[in-house]
Image: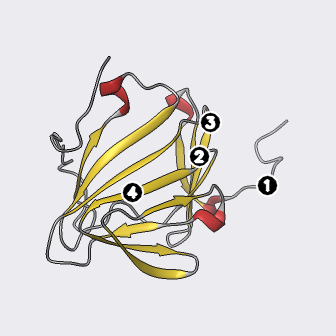
Amino acid sequence: MRRYNLNEPEFTFDDDDPDGYHTGYDRIGPKVGGARVGATHYLIKPGQSLCPYHYEYGEEEWLLVLGGIATVRTPKGSEDLREGDMVAFPEGPEGAHKVTNNTDADLRVLMWANIAPIGGCVYPDSDKVMFNPPDKRDHILVERSSHVDYWVGER
C-alpha cells in the first residue's frame, strides 16, 4: 500500500508562474498509485491564487480547506471558507471558481476530481477555452474570439 501524509507535503513551485498565481503543489495521485481520481495538495501564500477563475467540462472538482482561510469566487460571488470546510464544483458554468488567499497567513487546500479522458476548461474572465485530450499534441488553449466557421479550410 502506498500512502501520502497531508502533514508531510513536498511542495513544488513553478518559476514561470506569474505573481498572483505563485502557488506550491504536491500531486498526490501518482504517489499513491491513483488512476481514476486526481488529488493535489496546494500551499497558497498570502496574496496568491490557485489559478484563474474557470470551470471544467468532464470533471467535477472538490475542495477541502486544510488550514487557513480561502476566499472562493463562484458565479454567486465570493465567500470565505475556513479549515474543515469542503465544497464541490460541478462541471459547467455553475461550477466556476477561483481560490485566493487574501490573508497574511499561508493557506493549505486539498483539491481532487475525477480524471476525465477528454476534458475542457473555460476561463470566463480572459475568454479562453482549453481542450485537453489524452494525445497532448492536440492540446489547445485559444481565445474564443479566434472562433472560425465550421467550413473554413475544408475542400
Up-down relation of residue 78 to residue 132 (above or below): below
Looking at marks 4 and 1 on the same chain, the residue that comes earlier in the sequence is marked by: 4
Marks 1 & 2, CB-CB < 8 Å contact: no
Marks 1 & 3, CB-CB < 8 Å contact: no
Label 2 vs label 4: CA separation?
A: 17 Å
At 18% from the left edge and 41% from the top edge, which residue is drawn? 9
Foreground mark, 3 or 4, reads: 4
In the image, which disc is placed on residue 118?
A: 3
Label 2 vs label 3: CA separation?
A: 9 Å
Tell which residue pokes out farthest to the bottom in this image: 77
Quadrant where the C terminus is found in the figure: top right
| Mark 1 neighbour density, 10 Å: few (under 14) some (14–19) many (20 or more) | few
**SS at mark 2?**
loop
Foreground mark, 4 or 1, reads: 4
Identify the residue position indicated by label 1 in the image. Answer: 149
Looking at marks 2 and 3 on the same chain, the residue that comes earlier in the sequence is marked by: 2
Q: Position of residue 74 (x, y in %)?
A: 52, 73
Q: Which color scheme did the rendering employ for the protein?
A: secondary structure
Residue 145 visible (yes or no): no
Which amino acid type corresponds to the residue marked 1 in the rendered image? Asp
Looking at marks 1 and 2 on the same chain, the residue that comes earlier in the sequence is marked by: 2
Looking at marks 3 and 4 on the same chain, the residue that comes earlier in the sequence is marked by: 4
Identify the residue position indicated by label 2 in the image. Answer: 59
Identify the residue position indicated by label 4 in the image. Answer: 64
Foreground mark, 2 or 4, reads: 4
